[in-house]
Image: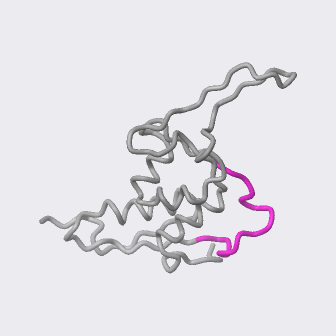
Amino acid sequence: MDAHFLSGKRIVVAGAGISGLSFALALRQLWPTGLIPPSVVIYERDSAAVPAGREGYSLSLAGSDETGGLYAARDLGILDEVLKHATQGLDNPLALTVWNNKWTELLSVKFKPAASLPVGGIRIARKSLRSVLINAVGPDQILWDTA
């Protein structure tokens, strides 16, 4: 088998956010068997602890088609763990709802799950999604407090 140009090299990822962690995990999973993988080091300017006032919001991960975040979680091998941290969507399907200026509901659309997914969408706290990704990548690959 031919060598890959990244075999045995070192890849530096700037930031242990959702994108940087997803990249590191996807690279590991997509790397061809039998080839020496590159080493991946993630540099993160913040500490491992989530500071107060940061990451206090949730994200919607869609699962109604192949472009959604739940498909990405499935392909990264973390879907079951992500679903454990869902704050909404497992028991009560998420809906896109439109209201008027008097808060009268004008439209509500519930999304059906795409094939091979248990739900059409969830909400998850960003810090929980990041934690799932950190555990999947391995915290030893991240250099915290390093700008």
* Nearer the observer, 138 or 113: 113
Residue 130 percent across, percent down from the top left: 59, 62
Q: Is residue 104 magenta?
A: no
Specify the quadrant of the image occupied by residue 23.
bottom left
Give the residue displayed 22% in from the left and 70% down from the top: 35
Instruction: Residue at 24% x, 63% y: name it.
Output: 32
The percent position of residue 81, horizontal first and vertical second, equals 51, 62
Q: Taking 27 as reference, is 112 above or below it?
A: above
Magenta-drawn stretch, dominant element (helix, strand or loop): loop
Left or right for 79, reference 93: left
Residue 20 point in image, percent of width and height: 52, 61
Q: Residue at x 49, y 66 (%)?
A: 13
Q: Position of residue 82 (x, y in %)?
A: 54, 58
Left or right of 20: which side holds 106? right
Q: Is residue 53 above or below residue 117?
A: below
Q: How many marks?
A: 0
Q: Residue at x 40, y 59 (%)?
A: 26
Image height of 107 relative to 115, above or below: above
Give the magenta range: 44-59
